Amino acid sequence: MGKRVSLVDGDGPLGGLCILRGCMPSKTVLRSAEVAHLARTAGDVGVTVSGVAPDVAAVIARKRRIIEGFADYRVGGIKEFPLFRGQPTFTGPHELAIGPDTIRASKFVLSTGSVVNLPDIPGLREAGYVTSDDVLELEKPPRSFITLGGGPTACELSQYLRRMDCDVTMVQRSPTILSSEDPDVGEALGSALEDDGIQLHTATVVKRVEADGGRKRVIAQRGPHEMAFEADEIFLALGRRPNVDGLGLERAGVRSDARGVKVNEYLETTNPDICAAGDVTGSYELVHVAVYEGQLAAHNAFDKDKRRSQYDLQHARAVFTDPQVAIAGKTERQLSELGISYSSSAFPFDDLGKAISANLTQGFIKVMAGKDGVILGVTIVGAEAADLIHEAIALLYFKANVRDVLEMPHLHPTLSEIITYPAEELCERLEGEARVLVCP
């Protein structure tokens, strides 16, 4: 756009959360855990494997090598711009101080991300804990963990630790893990985690934490019953919060609260010359959403033809457990809350030829469609769900009908053809309703 741009970042390593402590390192170690699991279960497909022993130090060393390459590439791009390092603090609506330096600009974009949320649980600070940042660096993890939380990070890294031969107990307040999704999603993934040997306790509220002779104890309550869990370490995975500390937003006329920086549909803050993008807005903690918002914020900052933010497709998401979880479009919960009429059909992986032959039978696919057959949402819990969901994203993008799915060729035998089965059932329902209308 022909503008002059400067970047400001803190004193820590450059590269961003995704590369350094999020998406890429976690998926790297999850692959190691998956290979260990495949080796252990090779007998299920007639292959004898013995002496499987994860070398966690080697897993972490591999992760560091890979992430270093990603980070070096990203840092090279960052350093093409004037770069200011240190804590940034607004001193006015158009002025930012970084140590002895001051930057004045016509426009700013806040993209400071998020940090681990530390809840006010009595005794937690005193007893100590590890976060996802720490888990990704543990070369010699303790023998046992209690995971507090049931979101994507809690599920992914708890399964990683379990497959690295750690004992893991998960404690989740909601009735199911992944509580923001439809209940059947959390139930299916919960069963898979329990099959891995994870002790899962849902609908369980943490009351306090105690330290006892090198061990850690979590006191919780489920209904009228108090329960105690003991382990060597606590894995704190109760979400993240927007990173706004020390920014001096009030001096810039920017409103924020515990949920993040306030933005309108154009991603403008209460100071129209300052936009915000990514986790700092507290909306969707997804990398592709942050990229989308960053581009949109830059456009809206300088172009008179402003564009509204649209998240219906952008909110597609995945959890990289085994089985994976992936969702695009609306969920059943969202459709019900919005009062949208829909029909739903599900099909299990354990009835799909390729899944049976590949021993990948956990999970299901679910398709939601309107009364006219237009696809409203797709949920997948199963093998390679994070890749399979892209067909659903394309169908939603083009506002496709379930009839279109049956018109499209799907190779056999493949995992991707699983979407044809709920589509076929929904088509049959639509045709049945049409016949009823014609011949009352």
Image (cartoon, helix red, strand yellow):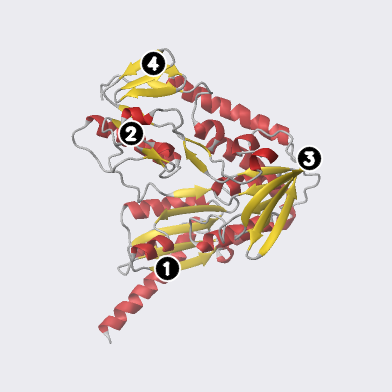
> Mark 4 highlights which residue?
82
Q: Residue 393's spot in the image, x, y percent?
A: 39, 51
Relative to residue 329, is residue 175 drawn left or right? right
Residue 344's disc number: 1
Question: What residue type is disc 1 on?
Answer: Ser
**Label 1 secondary element:** strand
Amino acid under label 4?
A: Pro
At 65% from the left edge and 48% from the top edge, which residue is drawn? 147
- First in residue order: circle 2 vs circle 3: 3
* Residue of label 3: 214
Measure the alpha-carbon separation of dots 4 and 1: 52 Å
Could you tell me the amino acid type at mark 2? Val
**Which one is nearer the viewer's eye here, 41 or 277?**
277
Disc 3, disc 4: CB below 8 Å?
no
Q: How packed is label 2: few (under 14 Cα within 10 Å), some, or many (20 or more)?
A: many
The residues bearing labels 2 and 3 have C-alpha atoms spaced at a distance of: 45 Å
Mark 4 or 1, nearer chain start: 4
Query: Front-most of 226 and 23?
Result: 226
> Outermost residue, bottom direction?
440
Question: Are the residues flagged by discs 2 and 3 in contact, CB closer than 8 Å?
Answer: no
